[in-house]
């Protein structure tokens, strides 16, 4: 038989347990966002030539057209169904709060200005899985946003002193700048293809530090659309400006309208290291101006 004292003791313990649980809930840290998420692919509509339609919208036959999780949704419909698969790159970056790994897992074309702007020691990686073609492209057939996007950079990296950004195995094309790096960003570009961007393939500004490996920057300054050939301003492959610094290894910079690499630095010391870099058919291959600011 349970005594009154024992019953009281059990009640007290139960109340304490509930209080402790509530306390744990109250002080539990927010879910850390440094988890991985996936971005699904997409495909173009049926037809050929003038009858071809643009990017397909949901629903699609489950498991086709880049529908990685087989739910029949792609694109923005996939962004909003509450799982860890997304249809657009920026929705995935938002989901990890610019602090996590975003992997593109199926072939796709992404008509979106991709912004990577971690804060407060955030670390973010955007990459396509090996063998996946992830084309971040200003021009998407049939999409009226194509005109506006061609006036913007494709990938903007605007990080912080103690943040790190990695971009791997993606294509960026038809923008003003294929990749624009600002502020105090620390960025590693690996296996990135920047092609047919009008003003710069890769433009590094301010005090950013950028390492580039196994990448190709080609045909900067050469972009032609329905309005005709674009006028490059200036049409440089890779530029380092201000107090930025860089290292480029095992990469190719070719076919630029103007310089392949231009260093337009206010830093007194040479801010660039090169190793095994192919510079060919640029105009010229390398220029440098040190302006003391
Ligand atoms: Ca899906
Ligand atoms: Ca989803």
Image: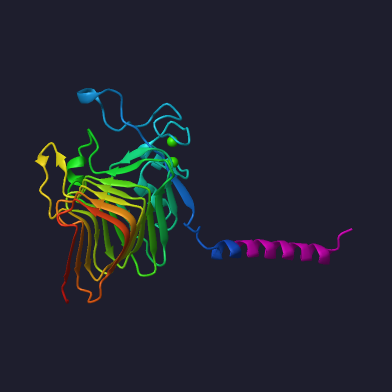
Q: Is residue 144 above or below residue 197?
A: above
Task: Name the residue at 50% across, 60% down.
Answer: 30
Q: Position of residue 100 (x, y in %)?
A: 45, 56
Along the viewing direction, whichever of 61 and 173 lies nearer the viewer: 173
Query: What secondary structure is the magenta-colored segment mainly?
Result: helix
Residue 14 among magenta residues: yes
Ligand 2 positioned in quadrant: top left
Left or right, 222 with respect to 179, comes to left
Residue range (magenta): 1-22
Q: x and y percent of residue 59 in the render?
A: 39, 29
Above or below: residue 220 compared with residue 17: above
Is residue 28 a member of the stretch shown in magenta? no
Q: Position of residue 234 (x, y in %)?
A: 13, 55
In the displayed structure, does residue 21 sit left or right of residue 117?
Answer: right
Q: Viewer-proximal residue, 70 or 170? A: 170
- The location of residue 236, given as percent across then percent down, is 18, 55
Residue located 47% across and 57% down the image: 34
Q: Is residue 241 left or right of residue 37?
A: left
Quarter of the image holding residue 158?
A: bottom left
Q: Which residue does the image show at 37% across and 64% down from the upper left?
A: 119
Asked if residue 43 lies left or right of residue 197, the reply is right
């Amino acid at each position: 038989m349970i005594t009154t004292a024992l019953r009281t003791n059990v009640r007290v313990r139960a109340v304490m347990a509930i209080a402790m649980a509530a306390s744990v809930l109250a002080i539990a840290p927010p879910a850390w966002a440094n988890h991985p998420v996936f971005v699904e692919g997409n495909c173009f509509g049926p037809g050929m030539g003038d009858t071809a339609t643009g990017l397909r919208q949901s629903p699609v036959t489950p498991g086709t057209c880049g529908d990685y999780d087989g739910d029949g949704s792609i694109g923005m419909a996939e962004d909003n169904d509450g799982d860890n698969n997304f249809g657009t790159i920026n929705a995935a970056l938002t989901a990890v709060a610019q602090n996590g790994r975003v992997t593109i897992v199926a072939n796709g074309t992404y008509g979106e200005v991709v912004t990577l702007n971690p804060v407060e020691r955030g670390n973010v990686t955007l990459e396509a899985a090996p063998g996946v073609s992830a084309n971040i492209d200003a021009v998407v057939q049939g999409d009226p946003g194509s005109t506006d996007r061609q006036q913007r950079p494709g990938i903007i990296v605007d990080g912080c002193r103690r943040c790190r950004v990695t971009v791997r195995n993606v294509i960026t094309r038809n923008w003003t700048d294929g990749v624009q790096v600002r502020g105090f960003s620390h960025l590693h570009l690996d296996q990135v293809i920047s092609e047919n961007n009008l003003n710069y393939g890769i433009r590094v500004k301010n005090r950013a530090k950028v390492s580039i490996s196994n990448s190709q920057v080609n045909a900067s300054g050469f972009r032609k659309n329905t309005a005709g050939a674009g006028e490059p301003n200036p049409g440089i492959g890779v530029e380092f400006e201000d107090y930025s610094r860089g290292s480029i290894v095992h990469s190719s910079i070719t076919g630029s309208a103007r310089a392949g690499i231009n260093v337009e630095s206010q830093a007194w010391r040479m801010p660039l290291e090169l190793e095994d870099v192919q510079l060919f058919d640029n105009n010229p291959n390398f220029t440098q101006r040190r302006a003391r600011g």
